[in-house]
Amino acid sequence: DSGAAVLVDGFISTVAAGIAVALAPSCRKNLFLATQSAERGYFHAAAALGPYLPRDECSDLQHEQPFLDIGLRLGEGTGAILAFSQLRAAAAIAADMWSLQRAIELV
């Protein structure tokens, strides 16, 4: 368990992620849905992954929403590439953003 984030892109990857979670439930915390698939079974596969957060922290959440829902049907991981840039930007903001108090102290 390296703690690395894994972007799950589309239906087939979501099914594979479900198998991984069944074999090693602790890996679920590292899985992030990159894109929503138009495949009929996608929502069932995503819901089967279970929630990202422990049940008591997200009692009304069926499963988290993917980063993107833009109708991609390319199947080459394109959605993961697009979602990665969003994830990287969010991590940079979270790591580097000053609090209001810090900004006031510097003025």
Image (cartoon, helix red, strand yellow):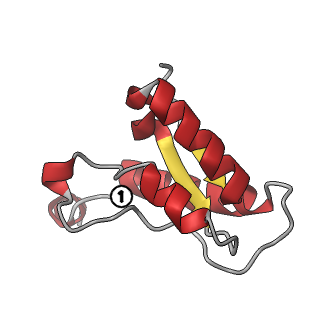
In the picture, measured across the screen, residue 96 lies left or right of residue 10, that is left
In the picture, measured across the screen, residue 66 lies left or right of residue 103, that is right
Question: Which of the 4 image quadrants contains residue 17?
Answer: top right
In the picture, measured across the screen, residue 75 lies left or right of residue 106, that is right
Q: Position of residue 16 (x, y in %)?
A: 64, 41
Residue of label 1: 97
Q: Camera-side residue: 52 or 97?
A: 52
Q: Position of residue 71 (x, y in %)?
A: 72, 80
> What amino acid is at disc 1?
Met
In the picture, measured across the screen, residue 60 lies left or right of residue 17, that is left
Q: Camera-side residue: 7 or 91?
A: 7
Q: Residue at x 48, y 52 (%)?
A: 92
Q: Secondary structure at mark 1?
A: loop
* 3 versus 64 height, above or below: above
Question: Which of the 4 image quadrants contains residue 85?
Answer: bottom right
Q: Residue at x 68, y 58 (%)?
A: 11
Question: Which of the 4 image quadrants contains residue 73?
Answer: bottom right
